[in-house]
Amino acid sequence: MVTDDSMRPSVENAFEALSAAAPEGWRVELIEAEIHVVPPANGEHEEIVSEVSDQVTERRNEPGLRTYTGVGLFVPDASSTGKVVPDLVIAPKGSFGGDAEYHDPAPVMLVGEVTSRSTGRLDRGPKLRGYARAGIPCYLLIDREEGEVVVYSEPSDGAYTRSTEAKISKKIALPEPLGFELDTAEF
């Protein structure tokens, strides 16, 4: 019997195997050393992501910013591997070239998550902490279960130092370089 530690499966090996085996549309994320298999988003979820993307495109102050969906980020403190896939990423054009599946979050200006029953706990906890520790300037949390939108900003010492909340149906300010009010009544 082999007792070599290199033969033991690691969390990362399990993550890679699950990622490869996941059905199309499903996401596998490793957050704070826990593997999460996330089903495809429902229509309402996708409508919200699409609406935020459209408003960013129409209203952003910086024309060089782009909205990305399905982009993997390497957020080192979110888990042992740091691999996450936010619902929405806003970054300068050209930030995610190449064939890497998970990218450096340094150019990211905003990450956005839209909660569902299967992801809400992660979006409000581990991802919030991980994005802050990565220094991502703004985290937009659209919490469908709570009926609110929260904008976290000004990360310092591994935590966001500012948060602004609004009920879904109201407007909420997004910080620069976006610099506009997101109209959540459009959700």
Image (cartoon, rainbow, N blue to C red):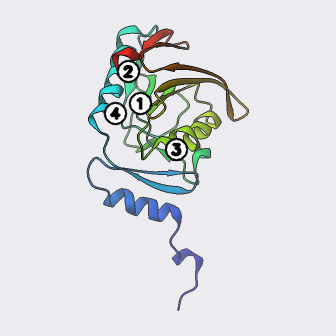
Dot 4 corresponds to which residue? 45
Label 4, label 3: how far apart the Cα atoms are: 16 Å
Label 1, label 4: how far apart the Cα atoms are: 11 Å
Q: Which badge, 2 or 3, comes first in the chain's sequence? A: 2
Residue at the image point whose x is 54% and y is 48% from the top: 82
Residue at the image point whose x is 40% and y is 45% from the top: 101
Q: Quadrant of residue 183?
A: top left
* Amino acid type for the residue under numbered disc 3: Arg
CB within 8 Å, label 1 to label 2? yes
Instruction: Characterize the local packing of mark 2: few (<14), some (14-19) or many (20 or more) Cα atoms within 10 angstroms.
Output: many
Task: Give the label, 2 or 3, closer to the camera.
Answer: 3
Horizontally, is 153 left or right of 60 in the view? Answer: right
Q: Which badge, 4 or 3, comes first in the chain's sequence? A: 4
- SS under mark 3: helix
Label 3, label 1: how far apart the Cα atoms are: 18 Å
- SS under mark 1: strand
Instruction: Characterize the local packing of mark 3: few (<14), some (14-19) or many (20 or more) Cα atoms within 10 angstroms.
Output: few
Horizontally, is 55 left or right of 176 in the view? Answer: left
Q: Quadrant of the C terminus?
A: top left
Dot 2 corresponds to which residue? 52
Dot 3 corresponds to which residue? 121
Q: Residue 84, percent across and down?
A: 48, 44
- SS under mark 2: helix
- SS under mark 4: helix
